[in-house]
Amino acid sequence: MRELGVTIAMMFLLFVLSLLDPYMDTVLTKILGFVVPSAPSDIYRPVGAWLFGLMTIGAAFAAYQGEALTFQGNSMGVRNALLGSVVGLLNGYLIVGSVWYFLQRFAYPIAFLGLSAERLSPLAQELVAYLPGNLLGQPVLLGQNLFLYLSVLLLIARVIR
């Protein structure tokens, strides 16, 4: 089952990105200030949003196209189709929700496309609290977040199976 392999890849990527996230403002500001000295001080926002968003989409594409983490199993049957659908919805939440999280994290640097925090509907503003980075990115045990524990749990399930 390819969907569970994608879930492992996405959880691990989001764990790594959550570790890098606190340092990105400083690192991007210094790198971009060195490359383009006359750049405005908030130039890191669009670069960070594009960088994290493209890494998320690229990892999802690579995970769906790769064969390394596929789970063995019978692809026929209603139960497997239902499980694949549920895990596919989870993957959609992780991918699209993470891109939205990074847009929100970097203050919607694509306002020229008509997307900004002020233009979100009341429902969308409430849903921001449930994006993967906000919901699963909180430290729970030993200072690590749920992305690490869920990806390790799924990887152990893959190895045992």
Image: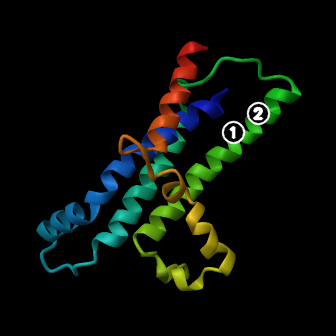
Within 10 angstroms of label 2, few (less than 14), some, or many (20 or more) residues? some
Q: In the rendering, at what x and y percent does residue 79 appear?
A: 84, 28
Residue drawn where x is 57% and y is 58% of the image: 97
Q: Residue at x 54, y 56 (%)?
A: 135
Q: Amino acid at mark 2?
A: Leu
Q: Is residue 111 above or below residue 14?
A: below
Q: Is residue 61 above or below residue 116?
A: above
Residue for badge 2: 83
Residue sitting farthest toward the top: 160
Q: Is residue 110 above or below residue 158?
A: below
Q: CA distance from mark 2 to mark 1?
A: 6 Å
Residue 113 in the image: x percent, y percent?
52, 79
Of the pair 147 and 40, the residue shown nearer to us: 147
**Is 52 situated left or right of 132 in this image?**
left
Q: At label 1, which amino acid type do we have?
A: Val
Residue at 22 percent across and 79 percent down: it is 41
- For image coordinates 61% across by 80% down, the residue present is 120
- Please say if the residues under marks 2 and 1 sit with CB atoms less than 8 Å apart: yes
> Does residue 7 sit above or below 104 in this rendering?
above
Residue 87's label in the rendered image is 1
Q: Is 75 on the left or on the right of 154, as rendered? A: right
- 66 vs 29, nearest the viewer: 29
Colouring used for the render: rainbow
Secondary element type, mark 2 = helix
| Most distant residue in the front direction | 141
